[in-house]
């Protein structure tokens, strides 16, 4: 069964190029793709793994 994903662009993304992502969540998977290459490859994460990554990224000093 194909499910149409509702993609949401990162609030940190701008229309000036650069590194932009979009995320689409389902109950079992969080899909991530490059907003400039919508037909390109996608990453898929379990929701707990995505939540752990987002928590880490929000507090990481880079």
Image (cartoon, helix red, strand yellow):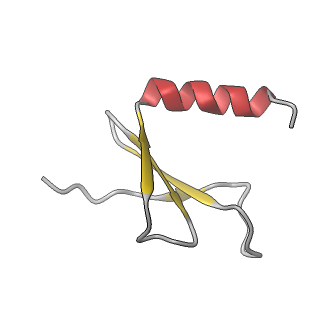
Q: Quadrant of residue 36?
A: bottom right
Instruction: Give left or right: position of 2 versus 48.
Output: left
Spot occupied by residue 15 in the image (x, y as percentages of width and height): 72, 74
All told, the count of numbered labels is 0
Q: Which residue is at a point 28% across and 60% down the rendered structure image?
A: 4
Q: Which residue is at a point 32% across and 33% down the rendered structure image?
A: 28
Q: Quadrant of residue 20?
A: bottom right
Instruction: Give left or right: position of 12 versus 32.
Output: right
Instruction: Give left or right: position of 19 versus 9.
Output: right
Q: Which residue is at a point 79% across and 27% down the rendered structure image?
A: 59
Spot occupied by residue 52 in the image (x, y as percentages of width and height): 58, 24
State the quadrant of the C terminus.
top right
Instruction: Give left or right: position of 40 versus 28.
Output: right
| Viewer-closest of 2 and 45 | 45
Residue extending farthest right: 61
Residue extending farthest left: 1
Residue extending farthest bottom: 16
Residue extending farthest front: 41
Q: Is 13 situated above or below 60? A: below
Spot occupied by residue 54 in the image (x, y as percentages of width and height): 64, 33
| Viewer-closest of 51 and 37 | 37
Q: Is 9 situated above or below 16? A: above
Spot occupied by residue 31 in the image (x, y as percentages of width and height): 43, 48
Q: Which residue is at a point 34% across and 41% down the rendered structure image?
A: 26
Q: Is 36 situated above or below 22? A: below
Q: Quadrant of residue 16?
A: bottom right
């Amino acid at each position: 069964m194909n499910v149409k994903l509702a993609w949401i662009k990162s609030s940190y993304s701008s229309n000036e190029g650069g590194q932009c992502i979009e995320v689409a969540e389902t109950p079992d998977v969080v899909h991530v793709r490059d907003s400039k290459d919508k037909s390109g490859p996608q990453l898929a994460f379990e929701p707990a793994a995505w939540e752990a990554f987002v928590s880490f990224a929000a507090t990481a000093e880079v």
